Amino acid sequence: MKIERDFLEQSEAYLRGEMNALERKAFEDYLFNDDQARKKFEEHKVFIQTVKSYGARVDLQQKLDAVHATINIQEVMPKKPLVVRLWDKYKINSLVAASVALIAVFTTLWLTGFYSKDNTSQYIALRRDMNNIRQNVKAQNALIKDINKGKSGFSTPSHYGATGFALSSNGYVMTTYHVIKDADSVYLQNYTGNSYKAKVIYTDPGYDIAVLEIIDKSFKEAGNLPYTFKQNAADIGEDVYTIGFPREEAVYGRGYLSSNTGYSGDTIAYQVSIPVNPGNSGGPVLDNRGNIIGVINSKQTETDGAAFAIKSNYVLEALASIPDSLDKKLILNKKNTLANLSRTEQIKKVQEYIYMIKVY
């Protein structure tokens, strides 16, 4: 019981904002690693909000009762208007009619399936449906050689498209889990149009993270990556940008970090004010100095410019869990060469390491 009481006290301190940055980080990590604790925290959060709401209503009612007790109703109450007198006389009939109308409305909503809709319909993942998009010639040729073994004809259109970015110079690439989930095969296309076959070597559905390895023999190792992951939390208001593939060519998007939490208060993600579309999922979010602060994975449909990105510290946490039994060692770059460059120069360097993800 003491342990549970201590946990609830920590939860309330967290909700009241009484923890310092280190305590908040430790508490968030604990919630992430313990599903039962995270569920208990969410339940307690709802309970606290309910109690506060109820307390506010009770307090208001007491204030109104106190004011009411000081008033002589008979002295201050004027003669009731005609409309009010008619309401007093016929209100029972009116209430019955209104009740029937409400029942009819709610019954109609239920029969049409309104209440069966998922309450997260405002939140969508950002993979791009590509069944109706013709692949470019280089991608087709690469797929024909690999899949059809020299036979002529067109390749099967991919099901989904998204974005990924290099984690290392030797062929490891990051994207989002929801993009490659249940994929039969995955191909990456760079900004010059060259396509490479890849395989999934690690996934973390909880963080919506996936790591791919390019296994195409035509792939040549790139030079040192110009960017690094930011290990500390980013600040609200920071100028940020992303590069992704909502269409068949790279698209640059600029905005700012608008919240330290994601959809419905999700502490794993940031909210960023950047215009994104299906296909941007898996794209990096970088700050002015070229540090990756997060990875785009979703957006809110009914709020313009409200996109969400998995925080870089959780990305690093997931990468640290990758087993050592990889074909090639995954070594993250620790030297940032973008810090003193203009935005256009940063983009020129970064785009060489951004890939269009094509899932079949």
Image (tube, rainbow, N blue to C red):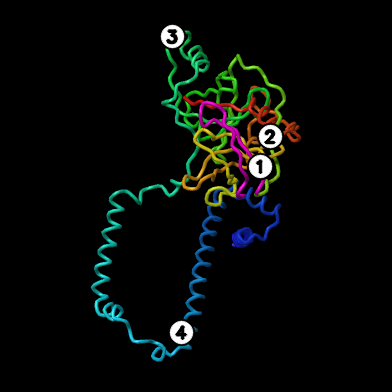
Callout 1: helix, strand or loop?
helix
Out of 248 and 285, give the one closest to the viewer: 248
Packing grade of label 4 (10 A; few <14, some 14-19, many >=20) is: few
The residue indicated by pointer 1 is: 313
Packing grade of label 3 (10 A; few <14, some 14-19, many >=20) is: few
The residue indicated by pointer 4 is: 68
Q: Which residues are magenta?
A: 237-260
Residue under the image location 60 percent in, 48 percent down:
258
Packing grade of label 1 (10 A; few <14, some 14-19, many >=20) is: some
Callout 2: helix, strand or loop?
helix
Q: Quadrant of the N terminus?
A: bottom right
Residue under the image location 67 percent in, 31 percent down:
344
User: Disc 4 residue type?
Assistant: His
How far is mark 4 from mark 3, CA to CA? 88 Å
The residue indicated by pointer 3 is: 152
Q: Is residue 182 magenta?
A: no
Q: Earlier in the sequence, mark 4 or mark 3?
A: 4
Q: Nearer the viewer, mark 1 or mark 3?
A: 3
Q: Position of residue 45 (x, y in %)?
A: 54, 59
